[in-house]
Image (cartoon, helix red, strand yellow):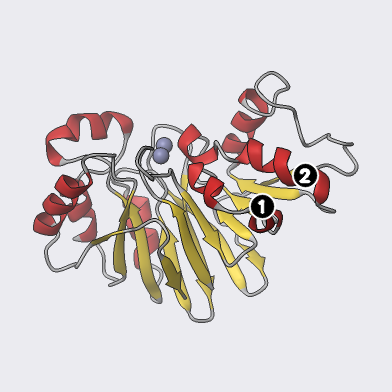
Amino acid sequence: MKLTVLGCSGGIGSGRHTTSLLVDDDVLIDAGSGLTTLDFEQLLKIDHVFLTHAHLDHVLGLPLLLDSVGDLRGTPVTVHALPEVLQVLATHLFNWHLWPDFRVIPSAESPWLRFEPLDFGQTFTLAGRSFRPLPANHVVPACGLHLSTAAGSLVFSGDTTHSDAFVAALNAIPDLRHLIIETSFENERADVARASRHHWPDSLAAELGMLSVGPEIWITHLKPGNEVAIMEELREAASGWGVEALIQGQVIEL
Ligand SMILES: [Zn+2]
Ligand SMILES: [Zn+2]
């Protein structure tokens, strides 16, 4: 399995794109502005989209993706997400006001878009790759994702602050090789991070200290302009972990 980072910033500006990860060439994890870096042929190959939550920085590319490729595909794009997330998309995005409901375009029998509820405890398997939601702790219903192949496991936290359930889930994955986890704010903005349920360096270091597994740690969702400061604080707070910032364009092979 090959995971390509299309976008991993907590914002936009100067080449930064928001969260979107491509798995091989047919599965997308989150549909932030990073999705717009793909060319048209690549967009056409996306059959499945897993969403960690409904916040705009993680879904904004989805309506435009469907509008771009829907008519040329023979099959719908399937969106996998927690039922609460799918409900938000139906009510607030694909609601005929903000964007058409592609679940009934061109017809309900042959649509461009399908919703597939992804519940905790379920695993969705696609050609030797499995996808499983993990509990997260964000201001809206949200999950992380556990990607697994015969070669090992990778977990993406999505947006989250500390979660005992997430830590327990990680510790139950003995072949965990890579952990992509967010840290959005520097320590002096811990109040903002708490209120918006994101990590800051000290909270992430505490979380890593609870792990009994030893994955490579990749930091994502750094707020624009504060990337260097956050990473400096993280390297100090979580010394020994070798934390690295995830980079747009980076490829992780599993
Ligand atoms: Zn969010
Ligand atoms: Zn976000």
253 is higher (above) or lower (below) than 66: below
95 is higher (above) or lower (below) than 139: above
- Whether residue 113 sits left or right of residue 110 in the image: it is left
- Say what amino acid the circle numbered 2 marks: Gly
Image location of residue 113, percent across then percent down: 75, 42
Q: Can residue 122 be spotted in the picture?
A: no
Identify the element where label 1 is drawn: helix
Image location of residue 142, percent across then percent down: 47, 41
Image location of residue 45, percent across then percent down: 69, 59
Q: Nearer the viewer, mark 2 or mark 1?
A: 1
Which quadrant contains ligand 1? top left
The residue depicted at 9 percent of the width and 57 percent of the height is 236
The residue depicted at 52 percent of the width and 50 percent of the height is 37
Residue that carries the numbered disc 2 in the rendered image: 70
- Say what amino acid the circle numbered 1 marks: Phe
Residue lying farthest bottom?
151
- Whether residue 187 sits left or right of residue 39 in the image: it is left
Identify the element where label 2 is drawn: helix
Q: Cβ–Cβ below 8 Å for labels 2 and 1? A: no
Q: Can residue 227 be spotted in the picture?
A: yes
Q: Earlier in the sequence, mark 2 or mark 1?
A: 1
Neighbour tally class for label 2: few under 14, some 14-19, many 20 plus, Cα within 10 Å: many
Q: Nearer the viewer, residue 199 or 168?
A: 199
- Whether residue 76 sits left or right of residue 49 in the image: it is right
Mark seen at residue 242 = none
* Quadrant of the image occupied by residue 39: bottom right
The residue depicted at 37 percent of the width and 68 percent of the height is 178
- The answer to whether the beta carbon of the residue marked 1 is less than 8 Å from any atom of ligand 2 is no
Q: Nearer the viewer, residue 161 or 245?
A: 245
Q: Tell me the CA gap for discs 2 and 1.
A: 12 Å
Residue that carries the numbered disc 1 in the rendered image: 40
